[in-house]
Image (cartoon, helix red, strand yellow):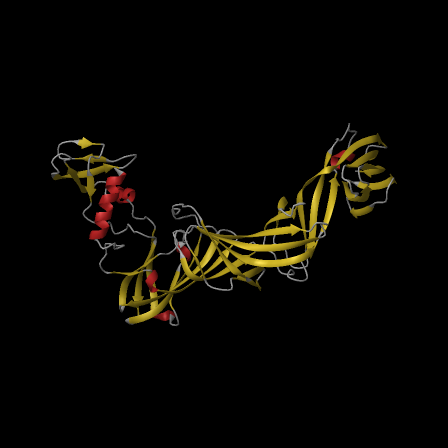
Amino acid sequence: MRRALTLSLAVLAAALGTRASADPGERISALSDQRAVGITIYNAELALVRDRRHLTLPRGESRLALRDVSAKIQPETALLQSVGAPDRLTVLEQNFDYDLLSPDTLLRKYVGRQVEVIRTDPRSGVRTRERATVLATNGGVVLRYADRIETALDGRLAFPALPGNLRDRPTLVSTLDNAREGAQDVELTYLSGGLDWKADYTALLAANDERMDLRGLITLKNESGTSYRDAAVQLVAGDVNVVRSAFQPAPAPQQLNAIGRTASRAAQEALLEYHLYTLPRRTTVADNQTKQVELLSAPDVAVSKTLELRGQPYYYRSANPDLGTRLKVGTYVSFRNQGGALGVPLPKGAVRVYKRDSAGTAQFVGSDAIDHTPKGETVRLHLGDSFDVTAQRKQTDYRAMDERTFESAYQIVLRNAKKSAETVQAVEPIPGDWTMLESSAPYVKSSAASATWSLRVPAEGETTLAYRVRTRF
């Protein structure tokens, strides 16, 4: 049945000249009228579209159908005005038609109306026509003929006309009052869903883990249902508050993504409390396409690698049995966003880190997500846990001094299976009002509720930390 409907639809479209509307008085504007388009894309799958077109409109009241707008337009945000003369054009009424032409939608529009069923005898080749009324299209078609009702289609359907509210593409239809006849540029501005962007970073660590090459890419994604040709593209990084409409248009059909890439770097500037990135040249953002552009390239960035063992506050509130053997020691890499090619606002995104093996092949060693990071701030990445450096923790003593004061002692054994010595940061979050009574190694009070030890663990050896602390709650 679907094949038959498709063939009938093709015949009908050819007969109508692929016209998008049955209203002969409607002025249709397609991409051929477009003079410029710009899109500003936000992190929240939202974009501001600016579509400028050159039109010739009659004086007085008329209807204008702007085709090839986003299928995920927010119609309540649409603003259409004459460029350079806003008083020349007045919008009296505005409708967004997103019920798109297809065999299924065309058939649904004809429920309760008559169509022609065309059959061809496979033996004689004789073609016959019979009129029928479409009763329903729920899970199939139900047709009522003059003498019967059938639920299967044996043949092709022919439709007498194309419904006026059925469009072949997403279309914004406006009733306009034009002050004077003639050619003019108009600009349609609206907010749309279906457009999004993100930042992705790759970092290649040096052999000594003290330097890295950092590269940032901006990835654009367009699933808005239309393409933007030679568009001026800008991106806003930051958490913009958006009022969501209670009405959402039907989503556009999904297709496989294509991947494209441009080669120039984006420029950035401050915008209120956000940052605005402008692509260096116009680019076409096709529908159902992913596109990448370089954000930054920063070679030879100084980094700091640390191994960290982190405790838990509940250790200090009661007597506990063995607190764990072969505890995970986290691997962290940090760098400061300043100097050289850095020192620019970094949009939030994923950082994927690589390191070359002994054969020179780059291997993936971990990833982490970063939030929007201003210049001058430190970026800290948790890449995973060390394989060769492990820890064992136990509570060696615990007693209650009174109802609110407690004293406890702990032992941490760090083991290193590597052939080189490693430094491990042992970070202990200690709750309440606490006092360190004894410690086998120097520590710093890294915050009001934590103590940090920097412990050197010899190659293929171990280091033991013992300490006693008094807490008051």
Q: Quadrant of the N terminus?
A: top left
The residue positioned farthest toward the top in the image shown: 321
Residue 399 picture location, percent across and down: 84, 30
Q: Is residue 157 above or below residue 27?
A: above
Answer yes or no: is residue 240 visible.
Answer: no
Residue 106 picture location, percent across and down: 26, 45
Q: Is residue 89 above or below residue 120?
A: below
The residue located at (81%, 47%) in the rendering is: 445
The residue positioned farthest toward the front in the image shown: 359
Number of numbered discs visible in the structure rendering: 0
Give whichever of 368, 247 is nearer the camera: 368
The residue located at (13%, 32%) in the rendering is: 147
Q: Identify the image quadrant of residue 125.
A: top left
Give whichever of 157, 353 is nearer the camera: 353
Q: Quadrant of the C terminus?
A: top right
Left or right: residue 112 compared with residue 473: left
Give whichever of 377, 173 is nearer the camera: 377
Answer yes or no: is residue 112 visible.
Answer: yes
The residue located at (77%, 33%) in the rendering is: 392
Q: Identify the image quadrant of residue 78.
A: bottom left
Residue 381 picture location, percent across and down: 66, 48
Residue 326 picture location, percent across and down: 74, 32
Q: Identify the image quadrant of residue 93.
A: bottom left
